[in-house]
C-alpha cells in the first residue's frame, strides 16, 4: 500500500510538472494590437473667430456667455466695466446683435417685452484621417454645398 502511494505520488509529480511546464509557456500578460482609428476632436466655432480689437462686435463677444441670457442694460454695464467704453447712442449695439443673431452666432429671447441675448455654441467635429483633416459641421447648411463641390 505504501509502495502504491509512493508510485502514485511520483506519477502525479510528473504530471504536475508537465502541467507546470505547459503553463510556463503561456504569457501572463496579453499583448493587444492597438489599431489607430480616426480621432474625433470637437471644437467650438468661437475658438476660431477673431474680431477686430476695440470694435462693438469684439465687445459683444467678450461680454456675452453661453449659459446666461443677458439684457441690453447688463451688456452696456459689462462693456463699461471690462473695457471702460461708454457708447454715445445706447441703441448702437442693436445692429451688431441683430446681425450676429441672423448669422447664427447668437440667440435672442424676448421675456416680458425685453430682449435678451447669449452666444450660440456651434460645435465643429474634426476627424483626423491619414494626414488630412476633415471638418464636419452639424448645424451649418452651407457645408452641404461645399461637400457637393468637393465630390465633383
Image (cartoon, grey):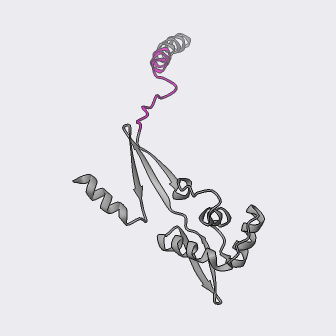
Q: Nearer the viewer, residue 48 or 147?
A: 48
Q: Is residue 121 left or right of residue 31?
A: right
Write the start and end of the magenta stretch as one range. 17-36
Residue 52 is situated, as x and y percent measured from the top left of the image, at 58, 57
Q: Is residue 34 left or right of residue 101?
A: left
Tally of marks = 0
Q: Which residue is drawn at the image coordinates 30% and 57% (left, top)?
A: 147
Q: Which residue is drawn at the image coordinates 40% and 36% (left, top)?
A: 35
Q: Which residue is drawn at the image coordinates 65% and 64% (left, top)?
A: 59
Q: Residue furthest left?
A: 152
Q: Which residue is drawn at the image coordinates 44% and 50% (left, top)?
A: 126
Residue 46 is situated, as x and y percent measured from the top left of the image, at 55, 58
Q: Residue furthest front?
A: 88
Q: Is residue 45 above or below residue 25?
A: below
Residue 103 is situated, as x and y percent measured from the top left of the image, at 47, 70
Q: Is residue 84 above or below residue 110?
A: above
Asked where in the image residue 107 lies, by quadrant, the reply is: bottom right
Q: Is residue 102 left or right of residue 110?
A: left
Q: Is residue 33 found inside the magenta-colored segment of the image?
A: yes
Q: Is residue 10 found inside the magenta-colored segment of the image?
A: no
Q: Is residue 7 above or below residue 141?
A: above
Amino acid at each position: 500500500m505504501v509502495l502504491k502511494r509512493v508510485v502514485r505520488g511520483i506519477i502525479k509529480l510528473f504530471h504536475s510538472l508537465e502541467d507546470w511546464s505547459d503553463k510556463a509557456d503561456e504569457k501572463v500578460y496579453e499583448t493587444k494590437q492597438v489599431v489607430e482609428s480616426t480621432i474625433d476632436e470637437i471644437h467650438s466655432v468661437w475658438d476660431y473667430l477673431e474680431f477686430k480689437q476695440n470694435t462693438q462686435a469684439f465687445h459683444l463677444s467678450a461680454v456675452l456667455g453661453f449659459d446666461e441670457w443677458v439684457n441690453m442694460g447688463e451688456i452696456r454695464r459689462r462693456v463699461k466695466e471690462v473695457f471702460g467704453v461708454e457708447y454715445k447712442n445706447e441703441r448702437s449695439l442693436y445692429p451688431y446683435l441683430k446681425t450676429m443673431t441672423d448669422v447664427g452666432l447668437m440667440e435672442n429671447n424676448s421675456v416680458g417685452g425685453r430682449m435678451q441675448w447669449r452666444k450660440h455654441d456651434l460645435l465643429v467635429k474634426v476627424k483626423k484621417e491619414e494626414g488630412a483633416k476633415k471638418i464636419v459641421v452639424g448645424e451649418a447648411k452651407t457645408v452641404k454645398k461645399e461637400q457637393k463641390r468637393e465630390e465633383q
